[in-house]
Image: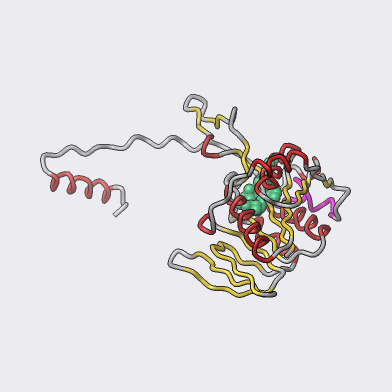
Amino acid sequence: MEIVVFVKQVPDTTEVKIDPQTNTLIRQGVPSIVNPFDKNAVEAALQLKEKHGGKVTVVSMGPPQAKDALKECIAMGADEALLVSDRAFGGADTLATSYTLAAAAKKLGKVDMIICGKQAIDGDTAQVGPEIAEHLGMPQVTYVAKIDVNGETVRVEREHEEGYEIIEVNMPVLLTVVKSINEPRYPTVKGTMKANRKEIPVWTVNDIEVDAEKIGLKGSPTQVRKIFTPKQRVQGEVIQAETAREAVAALIQKLSDAKIV
Ligand SMILES: Cc1cc2nc3c(=O)[nH]c(=O)nc-3n(C[C@H](O)[C@H](O)[C@H](O)COP(=O)(O)OP(=O)(O)OC[C@H]3O[C@@H](n4cnc5c(N)ncnc54)[C@H](O)[C@@H]3O)c2cc1C
């Protein structure tokens, strides 16, 4: 099986704090990591390769330092990596991002399965995967929690709030995966050595067939006009009362006054 996994390098948002004085994000010293859902995607691809043979290629669009994210995926066991990087791709929204990634996938040639994370923890839109599928005219299943391949058919479990949907689909197909699908493996020492030696090709705007009007900031129908830090939540109130009954009555009154109940 030829599997392509799209991985994004993101700031570790669990490490981003808000400066209460300036109300801005403290990004200094925040490490860049492989988007956690994308590690699940790589793990799913590696498991399929181990069972059915084939090759796993990881692809990222981003600045030169995104190579580190790709190296981590090689250290996990991916066979090939590709960085799509050019100033012309900068400022892309999800449409321009998915258009560029789809163009890279087209140039890679035959692919049986594309796997993406459900969403990136920085942009948090969960749009890129489905948009890539649309650009490639490929069927897609999102929120995938289990993948079984039988010949040309893929049987997946799609996670729901109330259970699972079982979907059968023919390859080539694009899947986006949720956390519960697996526990991503750690890179091995041998894998890390391989990753350090690996030459990662970089494709610029001249290497893929794209319309200059559809990439980067120019090709983005949405524009971020303003970014601001949400206000700190006001401190909660502890209701003091003689008895639990009185405290509950006071709480219900407050909730009712605030039109919450
Ligand atoms: C300077 C700048 C300006 C921006 N301006 C805008 C703007 O004006 N409007 C706007 O909507 N957004 C803007 N963005 C955000 C940008 O659109 C998103 O970061 C990007 O499109 C991916 O969307 P997401 O993070 O929500 O990914 P999601 O859709 O949540 O990601 C889903 C999955 O898609 C794959 N994926 C996503 N991105 C990549 C990637 N780069 N490489 C490989 N795989 C990937 C991964 O598998 C990921 O798990 C801007 C970003 C920058 C840096």
Q: Position of residue 59 (x, y in %)?
A: 73, 51
Picture quarter containing residue 91? top right
Magenta stretch, residue numbers: 210-221
Q: Residue furthest top?
A: 21
Q: Residue at x 78, y 43 (%)?
A: 198
Q: What sort of colour scheme is used for the picture?
A: secondary structure
Name the one closer to the observer, 30 or 210. Answer: 30
Q: Position of residue 199 (x, y in %)?
A: 81, 42
Q: Tally the numbered discs.
A: 0
- Compared with 232, 185 (above or below) is below
Q: Residue furthest front?
A: 190
Q: Position of residue 192 (x, y in %)?
A: 68, 41
Q: Residue at x 62, y 51 (%)?
A: 38
Looking at the rendered image, the quarter that the C terminus falls into is bottom left
Picture quarter containing residue 4? bottom right
Name the one closer to the observer, 133 or 200. Answer: 200
Q: Is residue 130 left or right of residue 81?
A: left
Q: Position of residue 120 (x, y in %)?
A: 60, 49
Magenta part mainly helix, strand or loop? Answer: loop
Magenta stretch containing residue 220, yes or no? yes
Q: Residue furthest left?
A: 242
Q: Residue at x 74, y 54 (%)?
A: 57
Task: Tell me, yes or no, if residue 93 can be seen here.
Answer: no
Task: Tell me, yes or no, if residue 39 can be seen here.
Answer: yes
Q: Is residue 89 left or right of residue 34?
A: right
- Compared with 110, 127 (above or below) is above
Magenta stretch containing residue 32, yes or no? no
Q: Residue at x 72, y 65 (%)?
A: 1
- Compared with 168, 34 (above or below) is above
